Image: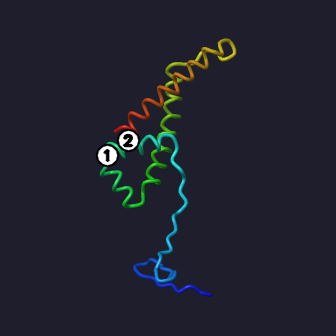
Amino acid sequence: MQQETKTENGITYVKRRDYWIPELEIPEQKAAGRFGRMRLKFIRENRKALYDGLICRCELNSYLSRIDEEAEEMVSRLEKELLEKNPAPDKAKDQMGWTAHMNMIREQATELTTAELIYN
């Protein structure tokens, strides 16, 4: 049995019993990472107009994915720059010192990134 369909305004509808139901497909989108989720929380609480606009234009997920990618690239770039300015101790001689130094570099890069991209 073939279902009855119609198209209005570029949307296809299927008749189920007495109701016309739109056949909508949600495009597959990449889930936002850590920085995207942080940005989502920030704009939801502090930038309601931006959040509502992104929702209305169905651009929220792509926006958050883009922010996440930019933030990850910025963290990597900042880590390299900070490591050039402040080299780590020799890993073979001082493993704990090297680990602490690298963690400090990562945290500094993450803090700078969140201040610039997430909370502005």
108 vs 20: above or below = above
- The label number, if any, that marks residue 47 in the structure image: 1
**Residue at figure coordinates x 39%, y 57% from the top left:** 55
The foreground one among 94 and 53 is 53
Tell me the element at label 2: helix
- List the residue tagged with mark 2: 42
Please, what is the three-letter code of the amino acid marked with disc 1? Arg
Bin the neighbour count of mark 1 within 10 Å (Cα to Cα): few under 14, some 14-19, many 20 and up: few
The foreground one among 64 and 98 is 64
The foreground one among 29 and 44 is 44
Q: Earlier in the sequence, mark 2 or mark 1?
A: 2
102 vs 77: above or below = above
**Residue at figure coordinates x 31%, y 46% from the top left:** 47
Please, what is the three-letter code of the amino acid marked with disc 2? Phe
**Residue at figure coordinates x 51%, y 84% from the top left:** 5
Image quarter (top left, top right, bottom left or bottom right) of the C terminus:
top left
- The label number, if any, that marks residue 104 in the structure image: none
- Residue with the most extreme left position: 49
In percent of width and height, residue 52 lies at 34, 55
In percent of width and height, residue 23 lies at 50, 74
Left or right for 16, reference 2: left
The residues tagged by marks 2 and 1 sit, at their Cα atoms, a distance apart of 7 Å
Image quarter (top left, top right, bottom left or bottom right) of the N terminus:
bottom right
90 vs 67: above or below = above
Left or right for 104, reference 98: left
Q: Contact, CB < 8 Å: mark 2 with mark 1?
A: yes
87 vs 12: above or below = above
- Residue with the most extreme top position: 93
Left or right for 56, reference 102: left
In percent of width and height, residue 100 lies at 57, 18
